[in-house]
Image: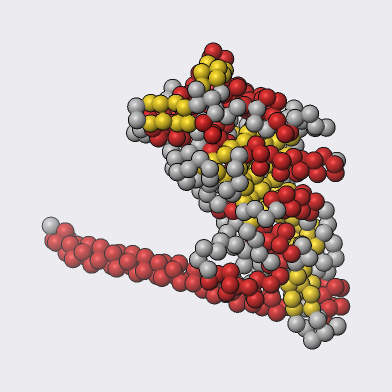
Amino acid sequence: MQENNKSYPILIIGAFTVILFASMVAYICTYAVTNHRVMMDNSYNAHQTLLRKQNTRGTIYSSDGKVLAETKTDEVGNETREYPYGKTFSHVIGFSVNGRSGIENLANYYLINSNAALKSKAEAKENDQKFPGDNVYTTLDTALQETAFEALSARDGAIVVTEVETGRVLALVSKPDFDPGTILNDWEEITSDKNNTQLLNRATQGLYPPGSTFKIVTALEYYKEKGEDYKNYTYNCNGKFTSGDDVIRCFHGESHGSLDFAMSFAKSCNSSFANMSLQLDKSDFGKTLEKLMFNSDLPWEMNYSKSNAVCSDALSDGDTMQLGIGQGTTTVTPLHMNLITAAIANDGTLMKPYLIDKVVTADGKTIESFSPKEYKKLMSEDESDFLKTLMEGVVEKGTASKLKGLSYTAAGKTGSAEFKDSTSDSHAWFTGFAPAEDPEIAVTIIVENAGSGGEFAVPIAKRIFDRYFEMK
Ligand SMILES: [Zn+2]
């Protein structure tokens, strides 16, 4: 008993010591971790400053070996960053000042370092020059970028071109644009006007109503739920579809007459798709949207916006009809639409899109190279085959007939997305791929406030496809 009595204080002191020690450890750990991050940032910044003093920023090349950005040094050592293609690559290459953007930001780490051979470094030192930074080769193709840039002309909008089997980004255009070479001088003008959205990369950050391009998603959901029964689907369009107080009209009030499933898609009949969307399971539709990366992250390493499309049992019939035709609160980025299209073209598998192909030292030694990576299966091969056939129908007998009878085959979906309460204001969309039977590239276009997709976006797609197949 005595021993026990004595042991209580010891236990209490012991426990107290343990608690005190534990809290000290916790405090030290928290303090160290929190401040470690600050220290890391500071040393990183200091390190960057050092690297910039030591090395000349590397050059950014296109996949065809053209200079897209390079640093020139004059006799007294002043450096200027030059962009030989001016505005053509503005958003995707970006700039290296004022916080950086585009590939200038994405590849900054490579560009400010120099892994040049000792001999080259010794030579530079002898001539009182900085070490040559490492160069970055992108996946971008100058001919396709120039074609896309010119085809969009003075319109606002965006174009995304990717290689479906690899995920290589071949072209990325956004307008209005800016000249990265004069960005410092233009900065105040560009940023002072709140309505001026020149710096916004519409291809990846622009959220647009998808309009009829979204019928790809609605058609997929219908097929997932009904399977081969889609062949029995018929609808007689008189220009509008009414459910309760909600009315959906076909573009320009057109009456499409008697349609099966494929013709509803080819002619882009809003009434038929509103009718179709009410036959879908709302909860399952919601799951399909998540699988297609709506309301979620995209495999993209630069700035982008998340697309919005929601469907659940709580969604009203009116909102479901709007969703089915890609209107209402549904928004998507051109990049996201391109990724869905590329996955359809690639048997349902989305390859991770990428922009940097390799990093090469000033002496030509490759120190890092990037290869295609599978990101995610967005749908089964059977489902992608189903959508491919529907998209071929759009070219053969529907709204993208301007792509018919060419030296190559193409498939796709048009859209004329309304963005005000008026049918006269619509964004022209096209998203598709070529060749239809063995797809190589996916092209997505949005032309703001232009009119119908068939009239204004399809001809741009044709110019890009033409250029691509000319080069082969
Ligand atoms: Zn119709």
Structure colour scheme: secondary structure
Measured along the vertical axis of the image, is residue 349 above or below residue 43? above
Q: Nearer the viewer, residue 382 or 211?
A: 211
Residue found at the far bottom of this picture: 76
Number of dots carrying numbers? 0
Across and down, in percent, residue 123 comes to: 86, 78
- Say above or below: 434 vs 242: below
Picture quarter containing residue 433? top right
Instruction: Give x and y (percent) for residue 299.
Output: 59, 47
Question: Is 203 left or right of 9, judged from the image as shown?
Answer: right
Q: Position of residue 131 (x, y in %)?
A: 78, 75
Q: Is residue 47 above or below residue 145?
A: below
Q: Is residue 252 visible?
A: yes
Task: Determine the residue positioned at 50% across, 66% down.
Answer: 194
Residue at image position (46%, 35%) is 323
Residue 471 position in % (x across, y down)? 85, 44
Q: In which quadrant of the rendered image does the C terminus lie?
A: top right
Q: Which residue is depicted at the point 14% across and 61% down?
A: 5
Q: Residue at horizontal 22%, vertical 62%?
A: 11
Report whether residue 139 is seen: no
In the image, residue 374 sits, relative to residue 393, either above or below, namely below
Q: Is residue 246 left or right of residue 102?
A: left
Q: Quadrant of the N terminus?
A: bottom left
Q: Nearer the viewer, residue 13 or 416?
A: 416
